[in-house]
Amino acid sequence: MVSIYRWFLRFPYLLRLLFIVIIVILFFGTIIHYIEPDQFPTIFDGVWWAIITTSTIGYGDYVPGTIEGRLVAIILIFIGAGIVAAYFVALSSSTVKKQSAVGKGEMKVNWKDHFIIVGWNERTKEMIKCFKEIHPNQLIVLIDSNLKENPFTKESNILFVKGNAATDEVLLKANIKEASLILITSDPTRTELNADMNTILFIVAIKGVAPDIFCIAEILTSEQIINAKRAGADGIIESNKLISSVMQHAMYSPGISNALLDLVDLHSGARIQLVKEHAFAGQTFSSVSQVFLEEEKILLGIKREDRTKMLPPLDTILQNSDELLIVSRDHD
């Protein structure tokens, strides 16, 4: 008996309470059927009456007529109604706690093929906002240790996990093993070197838990790029270098900065991408460019051995290992 009781206690509180409610309803529904078989022809009729009575709805379609039946009804009201009320109170409390835990980033993520973004800042905010407008169905999980609650409470497909992305507990809570991509943004509150070291620490932790996930990291100092790659980063975003390049172009050609921003903006209707698999090996850059033009795409350059050559000589022969950098319409 003691072992059964201990086994029963292992179940969640709500489940135990629901089990008691069901037992009480079945018990009184069966008793009332045997006490007043004419008024309650079947056990189901008795159970129906017990449910309506304990829920305080009281349709009045089944009413005990004998003293014994009414005594059973009184006991049911005192015992059953209190248990049912306790169950619904517990259910409501559990729902509120769960919603609060979700908003505060305390719940485990059960999604698959989602994107994970580490770090909350203005870049992250703008990136998520723009990305959701273009890809509204993409599931995104945000990891941050400073946020108090999810900044996207109205978005059902954006979840927040509070904590340090360098810990296994937080990464597993974000279900990193089932995610398809993770992006690490640089911490703007740190110095550039410290921010990069922190990013590299995240990469090591991420690859330790989910070695196959595609990891993109923002690196501020050029000296730490090699360390980020050694740690396992699959893609590096050199944000300072990008900003410097835009500034240089703006100095040579005033007003060009807006055009460059429009080129990389998802809302511009253009999409920049690398084509890894192609059948153009042995052909010249000029002939392949013509093929893409007929498809309303522009060939900008080729990526060969981790180095991108923008607008190479027209007679450059493409290789199987080359990745093609093209600009296409967003719907392609």
Image: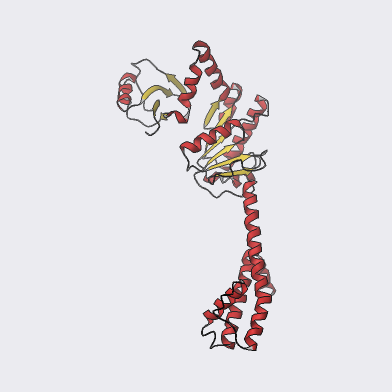
Quarter the N terminus occupies: bottom right
Q: In this view, does 235 lie to the left or right of 71?
A: left
Q: Give residue 41's position: percent from left, percent from top.
A: 51, 85
120 or 317: nearer the viewer? 120
Q: Is residue 198 above or below residue 180?
A: above
- The percent position of residue 238, horizontal first and vertical second, equals 55, 24
Residue sitting nearer the eye, 196 or 140: 140
| Residue 178 seen by the camera | yes
| Position of residue 28 measured from the top left corner of the image (x, y, whole percent) | 61, 80
Name of the residue lying farthest toward the front: 60
* Residue 297 as seen in the image, left or right of residue 59: left
Q: In which quarter of the image is residue 71?
A: bottom right
- Which residue is pictured at 47% across the width and 24% down the height? 262
Q: Position of residue 67 (x, y in %)?
A: 65, 88
Seen in the picture, residue 22 relative to 184 is either above or below; the reply is below
Please tell me which residue is depicted at 61% across the width and 68% down the height of the picture.
18
From the viewer's perspective, is residue 3 above or below residue 236? Answer: below
